[in-house]
C-alpha cells in the first residue's frame, strides 16, 4: 500500500498540472493514470491553440489568467517557448451578422482583403461579407507543457503510477482508500482529473456525478498545396465554425469541429465529417484535399453549463473535482491548476485570478447540487 497527502486521478494536462502545483506546496502527491502513459486521451489529441477570444466569459478570463505562465514559464520549466504566434482568419458570409458582431465583441477585428491575402495568399475572399482577424491566438507546445508539468511533479518528489485505473474508492477514518491496477493507495484528499471519465470515477467513490457529457471531435492531418509552405498560415475557419484548419508539424490539421455526445471511450475520427470539412476548406482556400494522411478523434468533456468544475464536493469529504474543461483545457490549465492547489491548501483565490473576476462560486461543483 502507498500513502500520500493528495492522490490525483488522471495524468492529462489537468491532472499533471494540478499534481505539480500541489506538490510545489510541499504536499506528498501521487498521480494515478489508467493508461500506460499520461496524455494518451484528450491532452494528446488537441488542436494546441491558445485562443483568448473563444469561450464563455469565465473561460476567457481563465485563459487570460493563464497567459503569464504560458508566456513566461518558471525558470527551468522548459527549454522551448510554450507559445508561438499563429492568428486566426475567420470568414463570414451573408446572413452571419449576429455571429460577426459576437466575434468582434470577443476580440476579433474586421480586416480588408489585402490584409487577409498577406496572411493567407490562397484565401478565397470574393464571397466573404466580412473578414475577421484574431491576432492574439497562438500555438501551444502541448507536449512541452505536459512534459514540463510531469517533470516538475517528479522534482517535487511526486510519484506517477501508470497502468493504474482507479476502480473503487472508499473513505473511512478521514482517509480515502483507492484500488487501482492491482495496487492500493491512501490519502486524505483525492483529485478527480479523469477527463471524460470523471463522473465514472466519482461514482466509483460513492460521489454523485455532476452530469458531464463527453463530446467527440474528429481531426486529420492533410498535406498543404504542392510546393507551398503552410507553416506560417493562420488558422482559417468560417464564422459558423463548421470546420477549422491550422498548420501542425509542417502540414495542416483539419477538423469538422463537431460536438457528438458519446460515452467515455478511446475514440476515433468520423471520416464522413472529415470529408465534409475537406469540402468546406476547398471553398475557403484555393487548394485540394487529396487524402487524409492520419486521423484521430478526441473527447471534449462538458458540464451541464459548459464551465469547468473545480472544487471540493459539498457532500463528500476530501473529494476534489477538476473536470469539464470542454475545448479549452490546455489553454486554461495554468489558471485551473493554480486555483485547485490554492483551494486544496485552503488558501484564498489567487490574486491574479480574482483580478480577472473569477470566483470559486463560478466553478464549484456546488452549482449542480
Ligand atoms: C480535437 C480537439 C481539439 C482541441 N483543441 C484544443 C485547443 O486548441 N486548446 C485547448 O485549450 N483545448 C483543446 N482541446 C481540449 C483539451 O484537449 C481538453 O480540454 C484537455 O486535454 C482536457 O484535459 P484532461 O486532463 O482533463 O483530460 P485527458 O487528457 O483526457 O486526461 C484524463 C486522464 O484521466 C485518465 N483516467 C481516466 N479514468 C481514469 C481512472 N479511472 N483511473 C486513472 N486514470 C484515469 C485518462 O487515461 C486520461 O489520461 C481540444 C480537444 C480535442 C478533442
Image: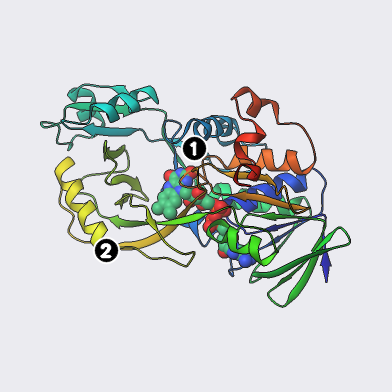
Local crowd at mark 2 within 10 Å, few (<14), some, or many (≥20)?
some
Height in image: 149 above or below 33? above
Q: How is the image coloured?
A: rainbow
Nearest to the eye among marks 2 and 1: give it: 2
Q: Nearer the viewer, residue 334 or 57?
A: 57
Q: Which of 300 and 35 is in front in this view?
A: 300
How far across and how far down the image is residue 114, in percent?
19, 23
Height in image: 26 above or below 276? above
How far across and how far down the image is residue 270, in percent?
30, 63
Q: Residue furthest right?
A: 173
Q: Which residue lies furthest to the left in this view?
A: 126
**In the displayed structure image, the side of residue 172 where residue 213 appears, left or right:** left
Residue located at (58% from left, 68% from top): 35
Tell me the SS state at disc 1: strand
Height in image: 266 above or below 39? below
Sequence order check: which comes first, mark 2 or mark 1? 1
Residue located at (47% from left, 57% from top): 214
Residue identifier under label 1: 83
Q: Can residue 345 be seen in the rendering of this structure?
A: yes
Residue identifier under label 2: 271
Q: Can residue 38 be seen in the rendering of this structure?
A: no
Mark number displayed over residue 113: none
**In the displayed structure image, the side of residue 34 where residue 3 appears, left or right:** right
Residue located at (56% from left, 34% from top): 62
**In the displayed structure image, the side of residue 244 where residue 278 appears, left or right:** left
Which quarter shows the N terminus?
bottom right
Give the spatial CA distance, label 2 vs label 1.
30 Å
How far across and how far down the image is residue 211, in percent?
54, 54
Amino acid at each position: 500500500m502507498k500513502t500520500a497527502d493528495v492522490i490525483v486521478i488522471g495524468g492529462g494536462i489537468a491532472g499533471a498540472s494540478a499534481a505539480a502545483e500541489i506538490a510545489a506546496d510541499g504536499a506528498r502527491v501521487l498521480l494515478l493514470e489508467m493508461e500506460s502513459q499520461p496524455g494518451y486521451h484528450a491532452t494528446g489529441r488537441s488542436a494546441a491553440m491558445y485562443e483568448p477570444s473563444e469561450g464563455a466569459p469565465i473561460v476567457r478570463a481563465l485563459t487570460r489568467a493563464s497567459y503569464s505562465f504560458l508566456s513566461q514559464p518558471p525558470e527551468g520549466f522548459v527549454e522551448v517557448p510554450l507559445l508561438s504566434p499563429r492568428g486566426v482568419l475567420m470568414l463570414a458570409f451573408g446572413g452571419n451578422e449576429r455571429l460577426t458582431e459576437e466575434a468582434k465583441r470577443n476580440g476579433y477585428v474586421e480586416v480588408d482583403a489585402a490584409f487577409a491575402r498577406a496572411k493567407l495568399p490562397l484565401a478565397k475572399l470574393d464571397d466573404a461579407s466580412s473578414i475577421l482577424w484574431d491576432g492574439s491566438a497562438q500555438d501551444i507546445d502541448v507536449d512541452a507543457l505536459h512534459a514540463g508539468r510531469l517533470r516538475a511533479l517528479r522534482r517535487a518528489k511526486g510519484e506517477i503510477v501508470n497502468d493504474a485505473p482507479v476502480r473503487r474508492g472508499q473513505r473511512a477514518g478521514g482517509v480515502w482508500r483507492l484500488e487501482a491496477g492491482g495496487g492500493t493507495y491512501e490519502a486524505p484528499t483525492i483529485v478527480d482529473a479523469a477527463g471524460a471519465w470523471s463522473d465514472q470515477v466519482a461514482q466509483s467513490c460513492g460521489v454523485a456525478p455532476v452530469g458531464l457529457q463527453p463530446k467527440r471531435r474528429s481531426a486529420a492531418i492533410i498535406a498543404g498545396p504542392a510546393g507551398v509552405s503552410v507553416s506560417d498560415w493562420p488558422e482559417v475557419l468560417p464564422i459558423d465554425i463548421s470546420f477549422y484548419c491550422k498548420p501542425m508539424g509542417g502540414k495542416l490539421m483539419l477538423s469538422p469541429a463537431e460536438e457528438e455526445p458519446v460515452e467515455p471511450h478511446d475514440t476515433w475520427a468520423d471520416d464522413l465529417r472529415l470529408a465534409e470539412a475537406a469540402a468546406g476548406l476547398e471553398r475557403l482556400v484555393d487548394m485540394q484535399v487529396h487524402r487524409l494522411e492520419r486521423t484521430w478523434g478526441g473527447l471534449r468533456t462538458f458540464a451541464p453549463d459548459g464551465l469547468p468544475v473545480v472544487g471540493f464536493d459539498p457532500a463528500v469529504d476530501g473529494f476534489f473535482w477538476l473536470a469539464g474543461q470542454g475545448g479549452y483545457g490546455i489553454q486554461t490549465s495554468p489558471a485551473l491548476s493554480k486555483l485547485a492547489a490554492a483551494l486544496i491548501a485552503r488558501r484564498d483565490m489567487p490574486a491574479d485570478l480574482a483580478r480577472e473576476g473569477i470566483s470559486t462560486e463560478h466553478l464549484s461543483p456546488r452549482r449542480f447540487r
